[in-house]
Image: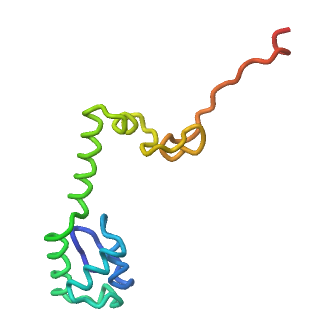
Amino acid sequence: MPRLLGVDIPPDRPTVISLTYLYGVGSRTARELCHKAGVDPLLKARDLGEDAVARIANLLDKDYVVEGQLRRQTTQNISRLRDIGCYRGLRHRRGLPVRGQRTKTNARTRKGPKKTVAGKKGVKDLR
């Protein structure tokens, strides 16, 4: 099982697919990596040699921001927005959608499960 940047990539998949298991590496970046490293993209990940894995790891370290460094950078950007108190920072702080989506309905991913509030009492209950 090949290991890149502290992540085990699946051995039974083609190299180009296995590389997408790294945070920050999509299909386009995976194809670029295979091309630059001179690795056959359709070769199974378990069939990669030590030198091919080392070439890919070297390219990732040198040319791309991935895994822990990318997560840290994203967290720092969000905390900067929170600290300066801009609108996007306030939305992050409150756990609401940041990019202008509607919140009257359809914001359940950011807002969490629905919290039901008791309704008003009807006219019949007053008698």
Q: Which of these two is toward me, 25 or 68?
A: 25
- Residue 72 sits above or below residue 64 on the image: above
- Residue 12 sits above or below residue 8 on the image: below
Quadrant showing the C terminus = top right
Q: What residue appears at the point 27 percent right and 79 percent down from the top-left corner?
A: 32
Colour scheme of the rendered structure = rainbow
| Image position, residue 3 (x, y; %) | 24, 75
| Image position, residue 112 (x, y; %) | 51, 42
Left or right for 29, reference 5: right
Q: Which of these two is toward me, 49 or 102?
A: 102
Q: What residue appears at the point 47 percent right and 43 percent down from the top-left corner?
A: 100
- Residue 20 sits above or below residue 75 on the image: below
| Image position, residue 83 (x, y; %) | 25, 33
Left or right for 102, reference 15: right
| Image position, residue 15 (x, y; %) | 32, 83
Q: Quadrant of residue 36?
A: bottom left
Q: Which of these two is toward me, 85 or 114?
A: 85
Q: Quadrant of residue 31?
A: bottom left
- Residue 79 sits above or below residue 37 on the image: above
- Total tally of numbered discs in the picture: 0
Left or right for 42, reference 37: right
Q: What residue appears at the point 19 percent right and 86 percent down from the top-left corner?
A: 52
Q: Which of these two is toward me, 116 or 84?
A: 84
